[in-house]
């Protein structure tokens, strides 16, 4: 993909956003080699991670687009293109929308009476406010409304689209004998149309995935969060998992 990048407009912990010189309604998202956890408290650089993240995100968004879900993804990220994808410009809603199919992570911690690894039906949706300084606190629907973060209709739409996204990715992983445990997505309002789009990235940092339903076989960023020692050997292990995931999602959109 050959997009002429303009000014940098935003920088996250693992990616940079640029204007597109060719179209004011589009942006370029470039994924980098950083890996972080604990709201940035833990940070490393894994050479090649940006390539794997761009591959994973673009394949996931391609599948979602094909299934009729509205995403910001327009193209790129798959080739030797500087890990850059072209997306529709959005006004981001500062929420992390988490869908859970299995009791794990912070949900297991907050609900110690529930058995880790047990299924949740229906899927449970939670909202977290994007606010690193305060460790992304959980936020209720009433608070989202009271603070003017999103409208009632938008909350409904985010829940529905998050559920549908989970169902599509759960099925794609199931076909590869991998259990999708939970997933985080983010939404933006399309600059062109105002409608909600699945935005940001969806990569191996965004979900928990357990091959054969076995937590100890996990392939996602939880491996990095769990590291006691972040030496070369350990980071190489993390990279191998990201490579495995990028290879597994390579034909997601052909499903
Ligand atoms: O930690 P917790 O159980 O709340 O995470 C739920 C899901 O959201 C996990 O798949 C995790 O990878 C993802 N997540 C994320 N970014 C965060 C927090 C959680 O992608 N800042």
Image: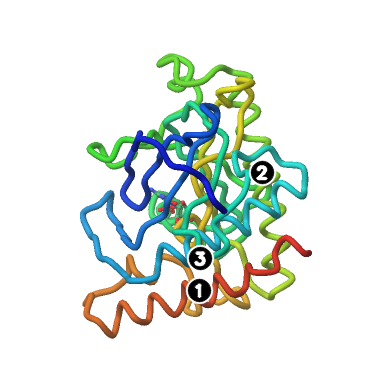
Asked whether disc 3 touches disc 2, contact meaning CB atoms under 8 Å apart, the reply is no
> What residue is pinned by disc 2?
163
Image spot of residue 247 (x, y percent): 59, 75
Question: From what the image shows, is residue 251 above or below residue 159?
Answer: below
Q: In the rendered structure, which disc, 3 or 2, sits on the residue that comes first in sequence?
A: 3
Horizontal side of 96 relative to 119 (left or right) equals left
Q: Residue at x 60, y 23 (%)?
A: 154
Viewer-side label of 2, 1: 2
Asked whether disc 2 touches disc 1, contact meaning CB atoms under 8 Å apart, the reply is no
Q: Viewer-proximal residue, 177 or 237? A: 237
Question: From what the image shows, is residue 220 above or below residue 30?
Answer: below
Q: Distance between the residues labelled 2 and 1?
A: 22 Å
Point out which mark residue 80 bears: 3
Q: Viewer-proximal residue, 22 or 182? A: 22
Viewer-side label of 3, 1: 3
Image spot of residue 184 (x, y percent): 51, 48
Q: In the rendered structure, which disc, 2 or 1, sits on the residue that comes first in sequence?
A: 2
Q: Which residue is drawn at 46% across and 28% down?
A: 140
Quarter of the figure that contains the C terminus: bottom right
> What residue is pinned by disc 1?
215
Could you tell me which secondary element the residue under label 3 belongs to?
A: loop
Image spot of residue 239 (x, y percent): 40, 76
Question: From what the image shows, is residue 82 above or below residue 70?
Answer: below
């Amino acid at each position: 993909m050959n997009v002429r990048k303009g000014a940098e407009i935003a920088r996250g912990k693992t990616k940079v956003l640029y204007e597109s010189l060719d179209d004011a309604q589009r942006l370029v998202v470039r994924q980098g080699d950083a890996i972080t956890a604990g709201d940035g408290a833990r940070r490393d650089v894994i050479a090649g991670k940006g390539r794997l993240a761009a591959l994973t995100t673009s394949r996931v968004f391609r599948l979602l687009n094909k299934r009729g879900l509205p995403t910001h993804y327009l193209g790129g990220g798959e080739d030797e293109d500087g890990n850059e994808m072209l997306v529709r410009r959005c006004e981001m809603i500062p929420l992390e929308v988490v869908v859970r199919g299995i009791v794990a992570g912070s949900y297991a911690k907050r609900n110690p009476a529930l058995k880790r690894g047990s299924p949740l039906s229906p899927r449970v949706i939670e909202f977290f406010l994007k606010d690193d300084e305060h460790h992304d606190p959980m936020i209720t629907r009433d608070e989202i409304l009271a603070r003017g973060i999103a409208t009632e209709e938008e909350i409904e739409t985010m829940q529905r689209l998050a559920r549908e996204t989970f169902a599509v990715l759960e099925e794609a992983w199931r076909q590869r004998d991998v259990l999708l445990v939970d997933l985080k997505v983010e939404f933006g309002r399309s600059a062109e149309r105002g409608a909600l789009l699945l935005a940001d990235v969806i990569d191996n940092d965004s979900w928990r995935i357990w091959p054969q339903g076995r937590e100890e076989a996990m392939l996602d960023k939880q491996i990095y969060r769990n590291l006691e020692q972040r030496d070369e050997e350990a980071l190489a292990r993390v990279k191998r998992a990201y490579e495995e995931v990028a290879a597994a999602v390579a034909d997601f959109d052909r499903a």
